[in-house]
Image: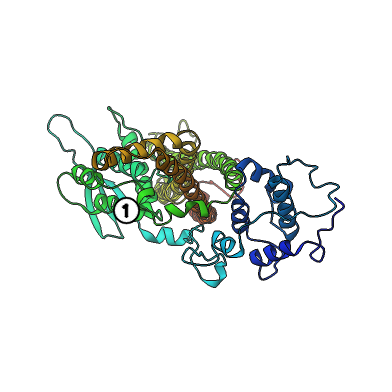
Amino acid sequence: MSVDLSVGAVPILYKEVHSLLNPNDRNEIDRELFGRLLTSTNLPKTTLDQVWEYAGAKQGPVTPTSLYRSLALVAIAQQGRQLDEKTLLNLEVLPNPSLPSPAELREKLGLTGRKMMSLDLKSGGSDPRILNTSYAQMVAQDTIRVALVPEKKGIILKHVVYEVSSQRYQSRVERRYNDFVTLFDILVQRFPYRAVPQLPPKRAMADSHFIEERRRALRRFLTLVARHPVLGFDKAVNIFLTFSGTDVQARLKEYCKNVPDEFLTSEVARRSDELVSSDTTVQFAMAREQLRQVYICLSQLREATQRMVDRSKMAAVDILVVSKEFATLSNISKLESDWATGGNDAWNIVQRALRSLQSLLVPIHEAHSEQSLHEEEEVLEELNLFLDLLVAYKALCDRHESGVVLGHHKAINRMVKKSSNSFGAVDPMKQAQELEHRTQFSLHCVHLESQMVYAHMEALGGITRALVRIQANGHAKLGALWSSMAPAVATMVPNAGTQVPQ
């Protein structure tokens, strides 16, 4: 490209736009602000995507050079010319794009007036595009426990009852599986653009192992819901965790009967077009692919951890088998004569030693059992919790890509039905605008849910630390216990010259 893109050579308009977007003259320009600038040109989305790409701003930071390239590309597109990779080649003069007036541009960029949003996070302002909630804060929101109620209730068809406790509300209530289903259905209807965690399956004939696994899954479901920055503060969750009446399902359904979905109650829903940058779909696709790879890796880690837990449990069982066989050997009756032994006392010495070893094996059995519990609760369950979150995020992505438009139409039809009953026909143009607003709001929510998932990456550090600590402490304890058996084992050697088989 022959045209000079240095600061001193570009047109005055380019410098003014740069000063507006980058008043502190930093090396990078805010991507969201840059995206709003392009959107203010009212060019088609496909054209804006080309501007992002050919300006070199699609990936990586937005630099002043990227800004100047984009302004030139916008001006060329406004002239009706097609954009391609060679558009800027052999360009002798940088054309001025047609932009809104300075006052209008500042308003569109959100830099003035009542719609102003803080784009400089260091100034302490609240930016609705940023989650602003750390993993530690989410964990601190609540601690959920789900336990099985010992006795089964019901006269003919028995069912499982769970005791659910919440540290946040200091509550303890009893819930059935169908109560969880009602809560899930309400959350999906109320928050269609959020990562609502999935419920474990239902089975007519359930054994104890299935019931225990489902209990754990229900605890993880409630934990993710209660700690979610949005779901956790919905009244439906409050009702589920605190209502002590006889029919919580009826109470939940009564609550949601006249409550619209989040789009109609959110303060930022009507401003969502300002919150979604033109490269959101590209960034979303890259984040989704990365999280897919994370899910695959964590699934493999979960399988490996499950094998660790199984080995610890099996080791505990094996130690009991060893102890039992030692006991059996030590209790075999003595021979009445020395005919078989020829006076060799080795068998009697071994029997006495085996009797003393039995009590020493009990702590080893307990240590293996304790090891398996720590591995299961602090590593395996935490991995499962993170994987459940990733599954919920994937379901949200699938809804957004393939089913969100259908969901939008359903929500609009419900609104149209209510409006028609009260005010007559609904303007089709308003319906189209409503659909566009919902699409933008969906993208905005996906952006925030992505940030929430990435905030949970901190959990991987805690899981790794727990794994190292459990293995180090567990093996050290087991090593000490096995070493404590050395004196008793030494008595099994008839004399110092006898070699113990290796």
Question: Which image quarter is the C terminus in?
Answer: top right
Q: Which of 409/322 is in front?
A: 409
Q: Amino acid at mark 1?
A: Asp
Secondary structure of the residue carrying numbered label 1: loop
Q: Mark yes or no: residue 99 visible.
A: yes
Residue 285: x, y in percent?
A: 59, 42
Residue 85: x, y in percent?
A: 78, 42
Outermost residue, top direction?
205
Residue located at (30% from left, 35% from top) = 208
Classify residue 335 by image quadrant. Answer: top left
Residue located at (68% from left, 63% from top) = 17
Residue 13: x, y in percent?
A: 71, 62
Snapshot colouring: rainbow
Q: Which of 413/356 is in front?
A: 413
Q: Is residue 310 left or right of residue 22?
A: left
Q: Which of 129/307 is in front?
A: 129
Q: Is residue 318 left or right of residue 418?
A: right
Query: Compared with residue 316, is residue 482 higher up or lower down, i.e. above or below?
Result: below
Outermost residue, left direction?
155
Classify residue 348 by image quadrant. Answer: top left
Query: Compared with residue 176, is residue 478 higher up or lower down, i.e. above or below?
Result: below
- Residue tagged 1: 234
Q: How many marks?
A: 1
Q: Is residue 8 left or right of residue 309?
A: right
Task: Specify few, some or many for label 1: CA neighbours under 10 Å numbering under 14, 14-19, or 20 or more.
Answer: some
Residue 490: x, y in percent?
A: 52, 50
Q: Mark yes or no: residue 161 visible.
A: no
Residue located at (48% from left, 52% from top) = 272
